[in-house]
Structures are given as structure tokens and as C-alpha cells.
Image: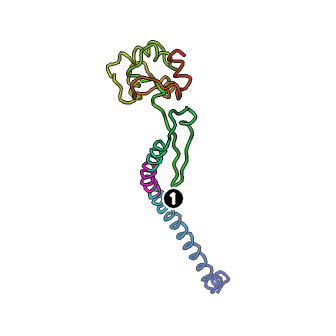
């Protein structure tokens, strides 16, 4: 037997092939475990999202209940803008909510205000105010509907959205009104 035949037929050759097979098995199981991890991780992510959605409904109801109780306990005759705008935070179980009060009476009702008042709002011009007051979409049911009025773009709406409303009788509460609302009224 020559040298090469002895080398390949020796018992050491079998040990080397066992090592190679073991390494291939480890590589196979590593790839399998990475694939399994990606599948399980995506399913866990979906379950967490569904759980958060279910929890958020109950947190919203709890926030409404807390806010309603707080307003009923309030015995003051009036509220200031700082009192209403204060962020209130509450933790319940695994969830947490933050809420503030908004006085719709501190805003200008775009359904009943004159074009002169609307034109004084930030981001609006007399032409846009005229378009809003003469719109066939009026009365508006939500303030975002003014985006459907010709000439009103996102930028103009974003500048005035915090100062307009579709609720109320058109009177403005000067105790809680921001400066922009008071300026629009001519103060």
C-alpha cells in the first residue's frame, strides 16, 4: 500500500468526516433556529399590537370617566386657560393615560362667525374667510371640513385649527380664550 491509500483508509479519516457532519448539523440547526425566531417574533409582535388595541379602548373609557368625575367635583364658577390646559396623568394597571380639558367656548365657531372675525385668525386671509362663510358645505360638522373649501390648504388649516370650532353658540369665553382668539375678535 502506498502512503495515500494508508492515509485515506486509516481510522483518523472517519473521525474527520464525523466532525464535518457534526458542523453541518450545527449549521442546519442554527439556520432553523434563526428562521423559527423570526416567525415567533413576528407573531409575538402581532399579539402585542392586538393586546394594546384592546387595552387602549378601556383606557379611553377610563380617561373619560376620570375627566367627567373631575369636572363634576369642580365647584369653581370659572376656569382659566392654565387650569384647563394642565396635563393630568393616571396609571391604571398596565396602562397609563394623559388627558387635558379643552374649552370649546374659547374658540371661534366657524359656522356663526363673520368673515371679518375669521379673517383675523392666524393663517387665514379675507379671501379665505369669505370662502369659508359662503361655502355650500356650511354648516360644518367637524372643523376639518374647511379643508374641503376651495383655497384652504393644510398650512392654513394647521395655523388656525387650534382657534376654531363647530360647537357652541358663537359666544367666546374670555376666561379661557387664547390671545389669538381675542385678537380675532378685535381685542
Pinpoint residue 167: horizontal percent, then vertical percent: 39, 29
Pinpoint residue 123: horizontal percent, then vertical percent: 51, 20
Range covered by the magenta-colored residues: 48-61
For the N terminus, the image quarter is: bottom right
Viewer-proximal residue among 153 and 99:
99
Is 54 one of the magenta-colored residues?
yes
Viewer-proximal residue among 118 and 86:
86
Q: Which residue is mark 1?
A: 93
Viewer-proximal residue among 18 and 150:
150
Is 79 one of the magenta-colored residues?
no
Horizontal side, residue 104 vs residue 135: left or right? right
Residue farthest to the left, as pictured: 136
At x 39%, y 16%, the residue is 131
Pinpoint residue 47: horizontal percent, then vertical percent: 44, 58
Give the SS element for disc 1: loop
21 is higher (above) or lower (below) than 73: below
Viewer-proximal residue among 74 and 59:
74
Amino acid at each position: 500500500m502506498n502512503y495515500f491509500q494508508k492515509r485515506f483508509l486509516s481510522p483518523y479519516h472517519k473521525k474527520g468526516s464525523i466532525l464535518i457532519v457534526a458542523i453541518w448539523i450545527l449549521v442546519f440547526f442554527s439556520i432553523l433556529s434563526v428562521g423559527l425566531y423570526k416567525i415567533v417574533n413576528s407573531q409575538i409582535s402581532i399579539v402585542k399590537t392586538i393586546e394594546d388595541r384592546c387595552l387602549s379602548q378601556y383606557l379611553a373609557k377610563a380617561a373619560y370617566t376620570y375627566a367627567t368625575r373631575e369636572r363634576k367635583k369642580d365647584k369653581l364658577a370659572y376656569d382659566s386657560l392654565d387650569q384647563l390646559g394642565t396635563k393630568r396623568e393616571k396609571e391604571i394597571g398596565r396602562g397609563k393615560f394623559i388627558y387635558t380639558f379643552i374649552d370649546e367656548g374659547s374658540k371661534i365657531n366657524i359656522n356663526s362667525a363673520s368673515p371679518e372675525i375669521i379673517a383675523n385668525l392666524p393663517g387665514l386671509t379675507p379671501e379665505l374667510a369669505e370662502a369659508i362663510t359662503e361655502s355650500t358645505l356650511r354648516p360644518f360638522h367637524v372643523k376639518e371640513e374647511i379643508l374641503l373649501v376651495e383655497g384652504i390648504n393644510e398650512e392654513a388649516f394647521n395655523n388656525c385649527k387650534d382657534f376654531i370650532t363647530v360647537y357652541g353658540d358663537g359666544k367666546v369665553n374670555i376666561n379661557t380664550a387664547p390671545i389669538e382668539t381675542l385678537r380675532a375678535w378685535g381685542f
